[in-house]
Amino acid sequence: MQSAPQPHLDRGLTLVHATSLNIANMLGAGPFFTIPVILATMGGPQCMIGWLLAMLIVMCDGLVWAELGAALPGSGGTYHYLREIFRGSAWGRLLPFLFIWQFLISGTLEMASGYIAASKFTLSLWPYGEEMLRSRGFTGDAVWGVPAAVMVGAIFLLLCQRIQSLGKLAAVLIVGVLAAVGTIIVLGLRHFDASLITFPPNAFDVDRKFLVGIGAATSVAVYDYLGYYNICHLGEEVRTPGKTIPRSVLISIVVVAGIYMLMNLSFIGVVPWQEIVREDSAAHQNLSGAFMTRLCGERVATIFTGLIIWTCLAGLLAMMLGYSRILYAAAKEGDFFSFFAALHPTRHYPWAALALLSALTALFCFFQLSVVIEGAVVIRILVQFIGQIVALHVLRRRGSQVLPFRMWLYPVPSLIALIGWVALLLTAEGNLLVLMAIVYGSGLVAFRLREKLMPLGQYPG
């Protein structure tokens, strides 16, 4: 009698699916609610320098992801690369563990930020809902947390299906995403008023304030770009990954970089930036709504806000899909609790990993948005981005790994990316560095305890 086949991940993602997932993740909610934040960091449109620096960093870092993703296609992205490259050494145990430890915070913070934004846009269309929540005792950021948590549950249910269906769903969702950003760009360029692009006095004086402002603007812009590597988390489910992964990573960066720059110019060429940075203004709370109201009236603005919510949820679906595979891979390899390696018996998706990430994301939806955004970027820099660059150089020096894709002009792009990530750490606010230290410090303690409970000879892999 033959035993029933074991559940497994299916290779069902094509280049169109992979690029759609990346772009949906990258666009998401970010540019619709972070542009006022970026303008405020430097007090004027000179913050566009931050967008350019962020674009340079992610383009160079994208080449790192492309090379590693093609050479080591597997579930988990950075976790998988660190484990494989440092396998058999103490670093091969420590780095994957620390990555998963920080990811449980940074990854779910990133997702929570998108849900909070979607919640704010939703309640802007339904003022009675906000009044009802406040009347029932929800105050401050908790008001946005309730609808956000409901959205987390809805996305969880949508993800409970086969990867082929999700790839097709991503391709459909990206149509709505591109319609939203395309509308802004077309209308913005048609009504562009160059006289609105003015700079405050001493805007380009290179002093400490300028450098700190550039660091903050670049950090927020990097947050908006996050997701260019989403397909790397799904490497085990990609067809011909040696070609598909590099192409999807680089295509998505180029497309989204162009979209972001045009969106920024469109917004500040229609709505004065002085109005956008004022916290009590409608433009600061819902920039896309103020933009559409100014050009097309309130009714169209309301309809367009619905499209923005679509965009937010499309990005969050793509993000949760990729991130669930990180936990799945870690649990499967023994670097996380084995329970979270469970796959659905017929639909073959990691239901336990999805459930844990959904629960943590729902919890962080009740935190302050600025803390959620900045923490999502800073916490992950040390192990995910810097650690991964070091890993690529180690892999190259060994020379034993087949590399279907090789970084152009190696090692220059990886060094530029490394300098960019270090600069972001050096310009980060003190409280964020303290938070990062707490996360990694507690991770080191947890790792030491795990090592005592599971000696080297018992360690999987």
Image (cartoon, rainbow, N blue to C red):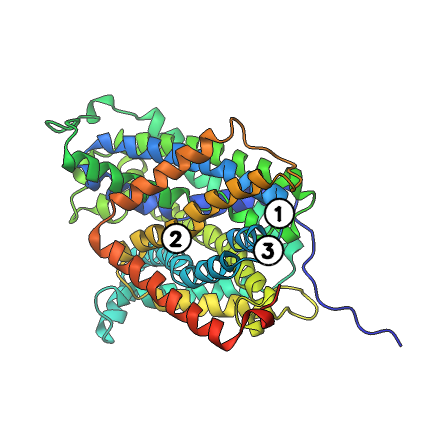
Q: Residue 259 placed where, x, y %?
A: 42, 33
Looking at the rendering, in which quadrant would you find the N terminus? bottom right
Mark sitting earlier along the chain (1/2): 1
Q: Residue 130 placed where, x, y %?
A: 27, 65
Marks 1 and 2 sit apart, C-alpha to C-alpha, by 21 Å
Q: Secondary structure at mark 1?
A: loop
Query: Is 75 on the left-hand or right-hand side of 187?
Result: right
Residue at left offset 26%, top offset 60%: 368
Q: Residue 254 placed where, x, y %?
A: 48, 32
Query: Is 302 on the left-hand or right-hand side of 85?
Result: left
Q: Secondary structure at mark 3?
A: loop
Looking at the rendering, in which quadrant would you find the C terminus? bottom right
Residue at left offset 50%, top offset 60%: 90
Mark sitting earlier along the chain (3/2): 3
Mark 1 lies on residue: 72
> In the picture shown, does residue 437 fall above or below 42?
below
The disc label shown at residue 75, or none:
3
Is residue 16 visible in the rendered structure shown here?
no
Q: Residue 344 placed where, x, y %?
A: 65, 69
Mark 2 lies on residue: 380
Marks 3 and 2 sit apart, C-alpha to C-alpha, by 18 Å
> In the picture shown, does residue 254 fall above or below 244?
above
Furthest residue in direction top, as rendered: 194
> In the picture shown, does residue 221 fall above or below 164?
above
